[in-house]
Image: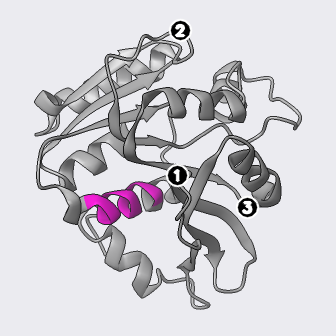
Amino acid sequence: MKVTTDACLFGAWIAEEDKSKKLKTTRVLDIGSGTGLLSLIYAQKNLFSRIDAIEIDEGACEQAKENVTASPFAERINVIHEDVKRFVLPGKYDYIISNAPFYEKEIRSNNEKKNIAHHHSGLLFEELLHVIKAGLSTSGTFYLLLPFKRNEEIRKILLKQQLCVSKIVFVRQSTNHNYFRMMIAGKFEKENCAETVMEEIAIWNDLQQYTNEFKDLLQDYYLYL
């Protein structure tokens, strides 16, 4: 499976957001883990994490197992071939991360593997949130990578599900492009839920070079930055 730049950015952002909080062993659930990218990035930066990585596609799951086995983090990442809607969660998680399905309402490809990776394939966004609510600890945080064009719809759904967005980072492909992704950090809604922090980041500058902000996040994971 192809590794996308925005997924790498998302993984690095999550790991950076959480690294200062690792004062004890924490449990992480990676929903729709693909080949294990997010789990591996998270494990590299957060040495006290224990991660369950769930993937429905058998081929991607096997590749994730190979990638995890070849890494220094194999003892801390458990790759599971399962449909998360049928999976019995073993307990509550401190963090739940997901590069969620993008295209619930758009034309499907003739490639079924691509459909599973990019369309909802039986897991709608609201269903994903139900899994998050069932598995997240009361003080936990969830992280989602989502298309910017669904911004208003997604925030309404989160409000309906009584989930609070604590931070949003809007992502541009370059400084000359409009937003195309958004990275969301959220938690259970509380009466004192703080106002959402909003930031933005561009992957490329106008000279087609990685921006300094992108390099700061990815330098520990890319060989040539």
Residue at which label 3 appears: 148
How far apart marks 2 and 1 lie (CA) works out to 28 Å
From the top left corner, tell me how far across and down residue 96 is, in percent.
Answer: 42, 40
Left or right: 74 as drawn, with respect to 118: left
Question: Can you see residue 190?
Answer: yes
- Secondary structure of residue under mark 1: loop
Residue 56 vertical position relative to residue 163 in the rendered view, above or below: above
- Secondary structure of residue under mark 2: loop
Q: Residues within 10 Å of mark 1 (few under 14, many from 20)?
A: few
From the top left corner, tell me how far across and down residue 54 is, in percent.
Answer: 42, 23
Left or right: 89 as drawn, with respect to 193: left
Residue at which label 2 appears: 86
Q: Residues within 10 Å of mark 2 (few under 14, many from 20)?
A: few
How far apart marks 2 and 3 lie (CA) works out to 29 Å
Q: Residue at x 22, y 60 (%)?
A: 21
The image's mark for residue 4 is 1
- Quarter of the figure with residue 193: bottom right
Which comes before the other along the chain, label 2 or label 1?
Answer: 1
Mark 1: which amino acid? Thr
Foreground residue, 30 or 6? 30
Q: Residue at x 58, y 59 (%)?
A: 165
- Secondary structure of residue under mark 3: helix
Span colored in magenta: 10-18
